[in-house]
Image (cartoon, rainbow, N blue to C red):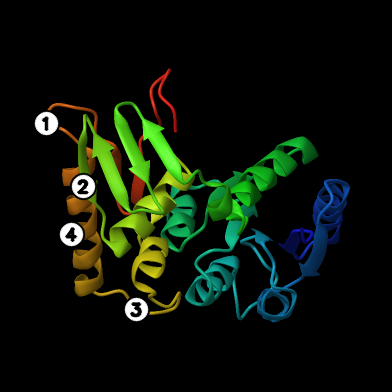
């Protein structure tokens, strides 16, 4: 398995060195960028699995928000963790709206930082799909992904190819939201930097509607949750249910 790569975008030497040592101690490869231009160059050449991004870069031409926007136009999968002293809610909302996966306010301990990074990398690993069980039981529901079938109480329904791909991705991380853009890429092969329009969203919403019709029963638990302005998530199973 390749060693995960962490890009540290930080203009101050002391905190940058602290983050580098913490990441290296955890077994990761690191690269550093001191400003926006260096960050985009390292992003293209180093191809990080995760970016630790400071917002207040000493660069008149590019802020951390600008870096985030550029990164998200090219890659919707790489995790971006904002690490900043800026505490205002408007900064947090802007970061999340631009596609940040987490927002940490300085100072943080090395243990806190490593724990957050490890959590995100577990979600990113390309082997995640291979680790997802092919037959999943969720209460009285049985999902057979290779056969693209869903069974409940002796009744079996077929899944379309797109439905199976979207459902398979949601089942990889129960309880966690999967972004619209990622589901569009998985289900329809939309490019990471393609402009989303209403026809794309309508296709995704129709797929979710059909999956709910096949997975859920009237009065029962909602299995596919809508996460407003983000995407969709499979509800975590109740105690005693398998997934």
- For marks 2 and 1, the one nearer the N-term is 2
Reading the image, the residue beneath label 1 is 218
- The quarter holding residue 146 reads bottom left
- For marks 4 and 2, the one nearer the N-term is 2
Q: Nearer the viewer, mark 1 or mark 3?
A: 1
Between the C-alphas of marks 4 and 3, the distance is 19 Å
Q: Secondary structure at mark 3?
A: loop
Residue 196 position in % (x across, y down): 31, 74
Q: Secondary structure at mark 2?
A: strand
Q: Nearer the viewer, mark 2 or mark 1?
A: 2
Q: Secondary structure at mark 1?
A: loop
Reading the image, the residue beneath label 3 is 195
Reading the image, the residue beneath label 4 is 206
- The quarter holding residue 181 reads bottom left
Q: Residue at x 25, y 62 (%)?
A: 204
Between the C-alphas of marks 2 and 1, the distance is 17 Å
């Amino acid at each position: 398995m390749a060693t995960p790569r962490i890009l540290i975008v930080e203009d101050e030497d002391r905190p940058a060195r602290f983050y580098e040592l913490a990441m290296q101690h955890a077994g990761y490869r690191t690269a550093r960028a001191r400003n926006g231009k260096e960050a985009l160059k390292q992003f293209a050449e180093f191809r990080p699995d995760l970016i630790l991004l400071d917002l207040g870069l000493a660069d008149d031409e590019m802020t951390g928000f600008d870096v985030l926007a550029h990164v998200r136009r090219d890659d919707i999968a790489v995790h971006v963790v904002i690490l900043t002293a800026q505490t205002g809610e408007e900064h947090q909302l802007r970061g999340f709206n631009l596609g940040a996966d987490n927002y940490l306010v300085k100072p943080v301990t090395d243990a806190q930082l490593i724990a957050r990074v490890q959590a995100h990398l577990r979600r990113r690993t390309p082997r995640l799909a291979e680790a997802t069980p092919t037959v999943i039981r969720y209460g009285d529901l049985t999902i057979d992904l290779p056969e693209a079938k869903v069974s409940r109480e002796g009744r079996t329904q077929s899944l379309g190819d797109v439905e199976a791909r979207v459902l398979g991705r949601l089942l990889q991380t129960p309880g966690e939201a999967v972004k619209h853009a990622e589901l569009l890429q998985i289900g329809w092969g939309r490019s990471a930097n393609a402009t989303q329009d209403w026809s794309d969203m309508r296709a995704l919403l129709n797929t979710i509607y059909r999956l709910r019709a096949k997975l859920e029963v009237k009065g029962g638990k909602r299995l596919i949750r809508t996460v407003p302005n983000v995407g969709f998530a499979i509800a975590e199973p109740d105690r005693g249910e398998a997934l």
